Image (cartoon, helix red, strand yellow):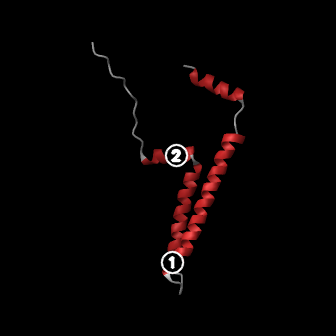
Amino acid sequence: MAQEKPVFDYHEETQGEKLARKSKESPFMVIGIAGLAAAVGYGAYSYKNRGAMSTSVFLMQFRVVAQGVAVGALTAGMAYTLYNNHFNKPSKQDAISDILKSNEH
């Protein structure tokens, strides 16, 4: 007698559902994407109105600013994670009650 294969409830995620799930898991990702879009827009605008500055000097200055923003975003994300993991812990009683609720059928 052959064993029946288990049935998995597999759901293909749309791009919108994936973005919503990821934004709940890490809210700084959405902030980073918005910052990237703003930086690209500002860079394009500044490049068009750079005046007599050479392209290589402009791109070098813009690279330094972009690296500073990236380091700042990483630092903010690490601080947020540190706070959630070490200072914003639920009490042991809350954790136990959550486990018991999830095990109820």
Q: Give the structural element (helix, strand or loop) at label 2.
A: helix
Q: Is residue 10 left or right of residue 64?
A: left
Q: Give the structural element (helix, strand or loop) at label 1.
A: helix
Total tally of numbered discs in the picture: 2
- Amino acid type of disc 1? Tyr
Task: Please state the horizontal and vertical placement of residue 63, each as a whole percent of the image.
Answer: 54, 70
- The answer to whether marks 1 and 2 mark residues whose Cβ atoms lie closer than 8 Å is no
Q: Which residue is the extreme one toward the bottom?
A: 52
| Point 53% across, 57% down: residue | 33
Circle 1 Cα neighbour tier, 10 Å, few/some/many (<14 / 14–19 / ≥20): some
Q: Which residue is the extreme one toward the left?
A: 1
Q: Which residue is mark 1?
A: 47
Task: Please state the horizontal and vertical placement of residue 1, each as a whole percent of the image.
Answer: 27, 12
Sequence-first disc among 1 and 2: 2
Task: Please state the horizontal and vertical placement of residue 40, each as a whole percent of the image.
Answer: 51, 68
| Point 69% across, 29% down: residue | 94
Circle 2 Cα neighbour tier, 10 Å, few/some/many (<14 / 14–19 / ≥20): some
Q: Is residue 55 left or right of residue 89?
A: left
| Point 55% across, 65% down: residue | 38
Name which quarter of the figure residue 75 lies in: bottom right
Is the residue 83 above or below the residue 51 in the image?
above
- Amino acid type of disc 2? Lys
| Point 51% across, 77% down: residue | 47
Name which quarter of the figure residue 102 lies in: top right
Q: Which residue is the extreme one toward the top?
A: 1
Rendered image: mark on residue 18: none
Quarter of the figure that contains the C terminus: top right
Q: CA distance from mark 1 to mark 2?
A: 33 Å
Q: Which residue is mark 2?
A: 22
Name which quarter of the figure residue 66 lies in: bottom right
